[in-house]
Image (spheres, rainbow, N blue to C red):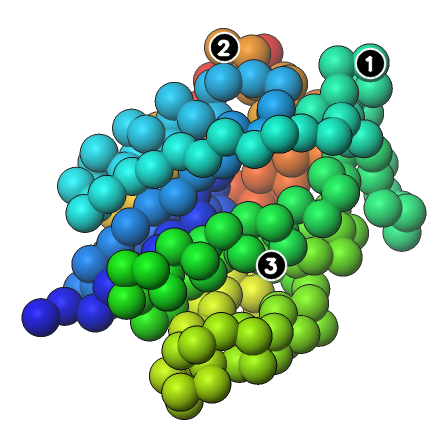
Amino acid sequence: MKNKAVVLLSGGLDSTTCLSVAHKEGLEVYTLSFDYGQRHGRELKCASKIASHYNVASHRVLRLEHFGGSALTDEHIDVPEYQDGSDIPVTYVPARNILFLSYALGYAETIGADAVFIGVSAVDYSGYPDCRPEFITAFQKVIDVGTKSGIEGNSIRVITPLISLSKAETIKLATANGAPLHLTTSCYNGREKACGRCDSCALRLKGFEQAGLTDPLEYD
Ligand code: ZN
C-alpha cells in the first residue's frame, strides 16, 4: 500500500512544485485548497486543473470565513508593486499558514496520511513570518504534542521541499519533475494575463530569468 500525503495546493508555482515532489516519491496524494476570500477565483481553478493533471486521489476545496486584513482578501487595500525592503508587506494574510496547516493536519490524521507538504521557502519570499523554518519547526512541535498520532509516536511530518531553495532553484526542480507550470498562477491581481509588477510576479520573473528558462505564462 502506498503512503498517503496531504499537499497544500494554492495553484501557484511553489505548491505545484511541491506536488510534483510528492508525486515523484510515489505517494498517494490528497490535495487541499482553500477559498479564503482571496481576490480572485483564478487560483482555485488553476489548483483544480493541476490536481487533475496529477490524477490525485482526492482534491478538496475548503471554504474559510475570511477576516480581510490583507491586500489579497480585502478589495479596499491595493496590491502594491514590488518593493525591496524588510517590512512585512500588506499582502500578508493574518495567520494563513497556521490555519492551512491546521486543516491539513486534521485531514491527514483523519485519512491516515504520514505527511503534509507545504511549499514555503525562506529564500526568495515576501517576508511572511509563517514561511520561515522557525515557524515550521514550531508547528511540528505542536503536532508532536497535540495529536493522537504524535503522542503514539507516529507524528505526521511537515515536509517543506522548497524551504532552502531560491525561486530559480524551485523552477529548475519543477521543470526537472515535468510539473505543469503553464497551469499555475502567481499574480496577486489575478487577471487573465499576469501583471508582471506585483511582488509575486516580480519574484517569479526573476526566478525564471536566473534559471535561464522561459515562463510559459502570458504577461501584460
Ligand atoms: Zn502580478
Check residue 182 in the rendering and tell me which mark sits there, or answer none: none
| Lateral position of residue 4 relative to residue 142, left or right | left
Q: Nearer the viewer, mark 1 or mark 3?
A: 1
Q: Is residue 141 above or below residue 194?
A: below
Q: Can residue 184 be seen in this view?
A: no
Which residue corresponds to the image point at 57% horizontal and 81% vertical from the top-left?
A: 145
Per the image, label 2 sits on a secondary structure element best described as: loop
Where does the N terminus fall, quadrant-wise?
Answer: bottom left
- Dot 3, how many residues are within 10 Å of its Cα: few (below 14), some (14-19), or many (20+)? many
- Seen as rendered, the residue at the extreme left is 1
Q: Which of marks 1 and 3 is nearer the N terminus?
A: 1
| Lateral position of residue 108 relative to residue 103, left or right | left
- Residue 17 x, y percent position in the rendering: 40, 50
Mark pair 1, 3: CA separation: 28 Å
Residue at the spot of label 2: 192
Q: Earlier in the sequence, mark 3 or mark 2?
A: 3
Q: Which of marks 1 and 2 is nearer the N terminus?
A: 1
